[in-house]
Amino acid sequence: MTSRTALTSIFIFLAFIPIMGQSSVWKVTKKNKTIYLGGTIHILREQDFPFPAEFDQAYNNAEVLVFEANIKSMQDPAMATKMMQAAVYGGDTTLQTMLSETAYHSLENAFKEVGMQIAIFNKMRVSMTVMSLTALKFQQMGMSAVGVDMYYLDKALEEGKKVEYLESVEKQINLLTHMGDGYEDSFVFYSLEDINQADTLLESMIFAWRTGESASSEEIIQEMKSEYPVLYQDLLVNRNNEWMKSLKKFLKSKEVELVLVGDLHLYGEDGLLKQLEQNGYLVEQF
């Protein structure tokens, strides 16, 4: 089996219960209080709509929609400027100075394959350069910027539903711009390996998301933990632990919440589903 380091997966999704279910929506209850927890993919293809019916059912049952962060705020020019400032190197540091000659030329060839010149990205941080390449590849594959999160955020705002967020956009920007720091070459090589098999990987991930099948996500999480323990800790473990504090508050409130997070946050020994079970909550596939 070819290695899947989860780097591409992070850009798509950004309780080990190994069963085939109806969807990636879970009902969590304790003492007559309910929340819904839905796994998401951040970008999708036109053929991936409509979503599994369980998502709309949970949305209709919920009074509050909870997202990872306010992704619509990136449309604000001030926030976009902040993102760009964080995405580039200062001083004399460039993409070329941060990478070995082999890694740089591998990345250069990958950009040529999608019709771009790497020189455009020479001041951009390694993580953001890789994300730009991934976005170009996805665009060629017919992927849209509208995924589960944006669809339901737009719907909730249009219908006047209460909306909350688990973390700030600034925190997400910091995480994304510093991925791979300290191991830039290996980050590039493994990312390119994932990008080269993006078609197969995406089909597998979208199938797992639609059906609530956890094995594929478990595999990705384990490889991420093994290959990139720092990234695993920063992007999954630390955030899951922080988000659990919010989930516990939601499970004491009078309102019913639908919490939507990247699919990879649900599974694994440090996943939200496992943590909820360990804290005594009843977790059922919806």
Image: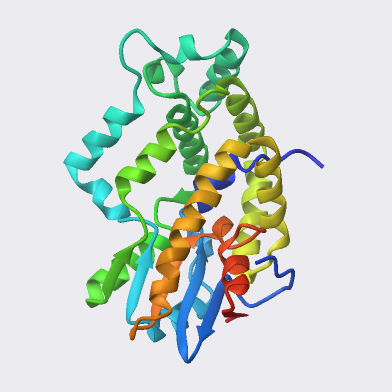
> Residue 123: x and y, percent?
36, 17
**Residue 8, picture quadrant:** top right
Could one spot residue 141 in this view of the protein? no
> Residue 129: x and y, percent?
45, 27
Q: Is residue 233 left or right of residue 4?
A: left
**Residue 223, picture quadrant:** top right
Residue at image coords 35%, 7%: 92
> Residue 165: x and y, percent?
33, 61
The answer to whether 6 is drawn above or below residue 119 in the figure is below
The answer to whether 284 is drawn above or below residue 10 in the figure is below
* Rendered-image quadrant of the N terminus: top right
Residue at image coords 39%, 75%: 250
Q: Is residue 132 left or right of residue 106?
A: left
Residue at image coords 41%, 24%: 125
Could one spot residue 135 in this view of the protein? yes
Residue at image coords 58%, 23%: 183
Hey, which residue is sitting farthest front in the picture?
Answer: 279
Hey, which residue is sitting farthest right in the picture?
Answer: 1
**Residue 248, picture quadrant:** bottom left
* Rendered-image quadrant of the C terminus: bottom right
